[in-house]
Image: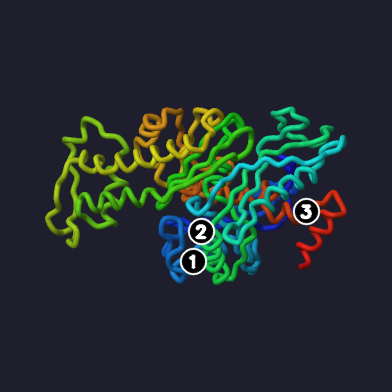
């Protein structure tokens, strides 16, 4: 990418807030050098309330959950923060309210070496095309460069050319949904420093360099949503999501076995599997009847009945991912590598099911790029919040506000237009 340095000075604090359908998590990191290295100093996570399928449905309940989570992280980081509360956080955006668009922009270089500002001019031009009252810009990511018709340029800086074409992945979010998120954050006495799509954050924390470079799809299966992102040549080139996740599997079990949602979650955790086996018919499990306590006579059903409920829903998730990827038009460059993360990725057998449905090589992942994670928050359910910190530390140049703030216009007319936009 065009700017590798961090915009955060040594000693500054970064805070990430992952607002999910089943949990809310907050990580606080401290920058330990000027190149983007940081250490984790505070963590907090709580069950979420007021959130359904990645969207806020009850402001009061959501605000309460956010306050409790942030308070836990602040308490853990109290020695570092020296009594000062958090002021701002980077917040995840549920993929169900975000859209990914591809743009190609051409800018004149006029025979000189390509600079950072030339790239920013291209990005700013793409952003102006996509500006709308109904949409909020989340990411502006340059993905492929072309200089004087020469394709496949990875980093054009310093190379001499007459014109440059840039393929750009613009990610936008539904403005009204994001305003509700902002309202919740503000009522918790915090400001939003940046936004990051859930699947992008998960990829940043759980993929290895070769996967990001050679081509890989990361699938984050959360409680209320499934989001996925395609990486290639070092960048995220596409992302999408739909409102189906692990909570839907739990609800299917509750309905199919006529039991409470709480007991259905317990059955899923203890006996669940993504694919049926021959022994499932003979193994019996206890199902507490809906409305009765555990001391009453439970039903006994074969484990195969439970798995027969779970497998179709999990298959549906992967079939929807496959269909969305085919519709994206990126089949030729996506590659055969898939990485699955998120809380539901811990379901036994899910790797085999994904390989069967997607016909790709699959591995399960958890955060690997954030050192010092406590065991309690080191699992795949925390890939997204870990990636938010990485995004804040190393990808600030992809934030639309940073691009517009730092771009320098090349002509008198463009300078006048920029001055009018900033002052009127």
- Check the image and report above or below for 84 versus 406: below
User: Which residue corresponds to mark 1?
Assistant: 68
Between tags 2 and 3, which lies in front?
A: 3
| Residue at left offset 70%, top offset 38% | 166
Q: How far apart are marks 2 and 1 (CA)?
A: 8 Å
Do the CB atoms of the residues marked 2 and 1 lie less than 8 Å apart? yes
User: Can you see residue 38?
Assistant: yes
Q: Position of residue 190 (x, y in %)?
A: 60, 67
Q: In this view, does 314 lie to the left or right of 182?
A: left
Q: Distance between the residues labelled 2 and 3?
A: 34 Å
419 vs 216, nearest the viewer: 419
Q: Under tag 3, what secondary structure?
A: helix
User: Which residue corresponds to mark 2?
Assistant: 44
Q: Position of residue 168 (x, y in %)?
A: 66, 42
Q: Position of residue 8 (x, y in %)?
A: 72, 54
Q: How far apart are marks 3 and 1 (CA)?
A: 36 Å
Q: In this view, does 71 lie to the left or right of 348?
A: right
Q: Position of residue 417 (x, y in %)?
A: 80, 58
The quadrant the N terminus occupies is top right
Crowding at mark 3 (Cα within 10 Å: few <14, some 14-19, many 20+): some
């Amino acid at each position: 990418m065009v700017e590798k340095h961090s915009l955060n000075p040594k000693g500054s604090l970064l805070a990430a807030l992952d607002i999910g359908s089943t949990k809310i998590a907050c990580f606080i990191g401290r920058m330990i050098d000027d190149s983007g290295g940081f250490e984790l100093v505070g963590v907090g996570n709580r069950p979420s309330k007021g959130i359904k399928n990645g969207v806020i449905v009850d402001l009061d309940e959501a605000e309460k959950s956010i306050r409790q989570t942030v308070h836990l992280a602040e308490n853990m980081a109290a020695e570092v923060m020296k009594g000062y509360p958090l002021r701002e956080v980077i917040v995840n955006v549920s993929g169900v309210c975000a859209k990914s668009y591809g743009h190609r922009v051409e800018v004149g270089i006029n025979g000189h070496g390509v600079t950072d500002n030339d790239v920013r001019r291209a990005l700013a031009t793409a952003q102006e095309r996509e500006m709308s009252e109904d949409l909020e810009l989340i990411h502006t990511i340059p993905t492929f460069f072309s200089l004087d018709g020469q394709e496949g340029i990875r980093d054009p800086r310093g190379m001499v050319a007459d014109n440059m074409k840039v393929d750009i992945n613009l990610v936008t979010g539904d403005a009204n949904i994001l305003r509700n998120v902002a309202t919740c954050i503000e009522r918790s006495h915090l400001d939003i420093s940046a936004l990051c799509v859930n699947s992008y954050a998960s990829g940043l924390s759980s993929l290895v360099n070769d996967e990001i470079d050679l081509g890989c799809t990361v699938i984050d299966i959360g409680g209320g949503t499934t989001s996925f992102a395609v990486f290639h040549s070092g960048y995220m080139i596409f992302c999408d999501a739909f409102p189906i996740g692990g909570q839907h599997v739990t609800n299917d079990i509750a309905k199919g076995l006529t039991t409470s949602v709480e007991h259905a979650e317990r059955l899923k955790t203890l006996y669940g599997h993504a694919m049926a086996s021959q022994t499932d018919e003979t193994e019996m499990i206890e199902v507490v009847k809906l409305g009765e306590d555990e001391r009453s006579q439970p039903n006994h059903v074969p484990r195969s009945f439970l798995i027969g409920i779970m497998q179709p829903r999990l298959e549906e998730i992967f079939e929807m991912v496959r269909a969305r990827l085919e519709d994206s038009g990126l089949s030729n460059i996506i590659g055969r590598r898939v990485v699955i993360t998120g809380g539901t990725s811990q379901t036994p057998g899910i790797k085999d099911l994904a390989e069967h449905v997607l016909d790709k090589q699959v591995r399960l992942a958890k955060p690997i790029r954030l050192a010092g994670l406590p065991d309690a928050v080191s699992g795949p359910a925390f890939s997204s919040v870990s990636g938010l910190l990485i995004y804040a530390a190393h990808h600030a140049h992809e934030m639309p506000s940073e691009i517009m703030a730092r771009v320098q216009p090349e002509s008198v007319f463009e300078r006048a237009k920029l001055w009018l936009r900033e002052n009127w």
